[in-house]
Image: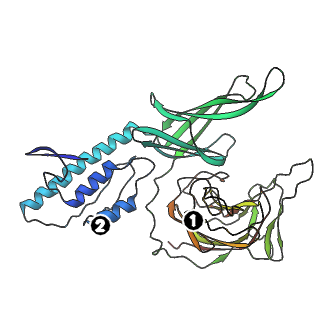
């Protein structure tokens, strides 16, 4: 709680000096909130409006809180002046406290990484109840919690556990755990990282350097009722692959058009593995609504990447418990609120709306993700920069899959 000093001594806001309810709410809400990955601007704004307060700009703890306040005058003359002074005093204390917190740990927030080899990665650092927690994405797979995270002598220290196989003196394979230590230093909004871990063969350490950039704070959730979309664009013409190409031109192309369907058939030869490619649009997009018709066969696995970096899962997960890897999930980040998959072999509809880094997913007519923030890229992203437009890309390096329609309506700005 913010405390305000008056003739009766130090008191909690509102109990002695009778500050406006709107100020009490905002002060107590901000200080009582968890200054982790993000604070819900939309929620604060909505609650503030209900008590007659407008919040014009609500920044993350990493920045100053810039608040433009307008309270309806309920008193006359000097009462209004005293109330205004209390508002300004309380928010001066609040701003100073927030600035101090941000200065204490500049590593808090989300970081878009480029890991060794050039793949996209992500690091998120947050504080819960005075303790640091972090999650990390290393190129592919899922966002995983790290083993430990702390700040020592102005440097970020992150550890991760890895299980590897080694041969003992008798040539027998055994599993062992190794610890990777990642050290980070800041240069403005850039982070420089160094990873050190024992080599899998047990001979010496492997040290690699990489880095990243601080992501801008997530915007407030958009009011989708106010968003206007442009004319529909048919990304697939039903005839050929015009407007599409592989994300990796050196990969094997398993994509073709058959009976007006977009089909991926990654056939493997016995004793020889072929690396099949993912298919992307030539054109790049920012915010949009995308409607997809797809048929997922038994054990098939694909994905629709929006902006080239966020995967909405396409897979045979019918009958499974809800999971952030199920059909319609934002892979490893957002779990569907309900299960809406159809059995394998049936046509399914997937509608994805992406606006201001918030995702809404409707699967087979059921809303399974409702305007939720996406904190960063997912495994297999083309890059980690969350600010740039990107293509729609279809995952084709796993199994076969069949798409029938992809129709996109861009957001009109």
> Residue 28: where, in percent of width, then height?
28, 52
User: In the rendered image, which quarter is residue 238 located in?
Assistant: bottom right
Which residue is denoted by mark 2 in the rendering? Answer: 49
Categorize mark 1 by other alpha carbons within 10 Å: few (<14), some (14-19), many (20+): some
Q: Secondary structure at mark 2?
A: helix
Residue found at the far top of this picture: 169
Which residue is denoted by mark 1 in the rendering? Answer: 338
The way the protein has been coloured in the rendering is rainbow
Q: Residue at x 67, y 63 (%)?
A: 319
N-terminal of the pair, mark 1 or mark 2, is 2
Image position of 87 with respect to 161: above or below: below
Q: Secondary structure at mark 1?
A: loop
Image position of 294 with respect to 33: above or below: below
User: In the rendered image, which quarter is residue 183 located in?
Assistant: top right
> Residue 361: where, in percent of width, then height?
58, 67
Q: Which is more foreground, mark 1 or mark 2?
A: 1
The front one of 43 and 239 is 43
Q: Is residue 218 left or right of residue 176?
A: left
Image position of 169 with respect to 244: above or below: above
Q: Residue at x 70, y 22 (%)?
A: 204
Categorize mark 2 by other alpha carbons within 10 Å: few (<14), some (14-19), many (20+): some
Q: Is residue 41 left or right of residue 362?
A: left
Image position of 142 with respect to 364: above or below: above
Q: Is residue 72 left or right of residue 59?
A: left
> Residue 246: where, in percent of width, then height?
76, 59
> Is residue 235 visible from the viewing direction of this image?
no
Residue found at the far right of this picture: 270
Cα–Cα gap, marks 1 and 2: 32 Å
> Residue 144: where, in percent of width, then height?
59, 44
């Amino acid at each position: 709680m913010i405390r305000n000093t008056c003739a009766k001594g130090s008191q909690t806001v509102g109990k002695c000096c009778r500050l406006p309810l709107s100020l009490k709410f905002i002060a107590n809400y901000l200080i009582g909130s968890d200054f982790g990955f993000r604070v819900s601007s939309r929620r604060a704004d909505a609650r503030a409006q209900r008590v007659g307060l407008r919040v014009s700009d609500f920044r993350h703890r990493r920045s100053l809180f810039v608040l433009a306040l307008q309270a309806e005058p309920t008193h006359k003359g000097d009462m209004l002046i005293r109330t205004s002074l209390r508002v300004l005093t309380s928010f001066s204390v609040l701003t100073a406290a927030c600035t101090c917190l941000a200065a204490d740990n500049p590593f808090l927030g989300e970081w878009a990484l480029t890991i060794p080899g050039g793949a996209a990665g992500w690091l998120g650092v947050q504080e819960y109840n005075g303790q640091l927690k972090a999650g990390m994405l290393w190129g592919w797979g899922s966002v995983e919690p790290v083993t430990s995270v702390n700040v020592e002598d102005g440097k970020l220290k992150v550890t991760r556990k890895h299980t590897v196989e080694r041969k003992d003196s008798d040539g027998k394979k055994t599993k062992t755990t190794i610890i990777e230590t990642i050290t980070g230093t800041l240069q403005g909004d850039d982070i420089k990282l160094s990873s050190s871990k024992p080599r899998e063969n047990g001979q010496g350490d492997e040290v690699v350097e990489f880095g990243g950039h601080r992501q801008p704070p997530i915007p407030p959730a958009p009011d989708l009722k106010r968003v206007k979309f442009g004319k529909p664009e048919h990304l697939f013409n039903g005839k050929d692959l015009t407007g599409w190409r592989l994300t990796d031109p050196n990969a094997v192309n398993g994509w073709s058009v058959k009976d007006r369907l977009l089909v991926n058939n990654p056939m493997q030869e016995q004793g020889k593995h072929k690396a099949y490619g993912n298919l992307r649009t030539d054109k790049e997009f920012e915010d949009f609504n995308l409607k997809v018709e797809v048929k997922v066969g038994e054990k098939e696995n694909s994905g629709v990447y929006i902006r080239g970096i966020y995967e909405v899962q396409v897979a045979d997960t019918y009958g499974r418990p809800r999971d952030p890897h199920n059909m319609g999930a934002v892979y490893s980040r957002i779990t569907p609120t309900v299960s809406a998959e159809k059995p394998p072999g049936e046509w399914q509809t997937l509608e994805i709306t992406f606006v201001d880094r918030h995702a809404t997913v409707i699967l087979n007519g059921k809303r399974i993700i409702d305007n939720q923030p996406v904190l960063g890229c997912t495994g297999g992203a083309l890059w980690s920069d969350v600010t740039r437009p990107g293509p729609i890309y279809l995952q084709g390096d796993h199994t076969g899959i069949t798409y029938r329609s992809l129709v996109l309506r861009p957001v009109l700005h």
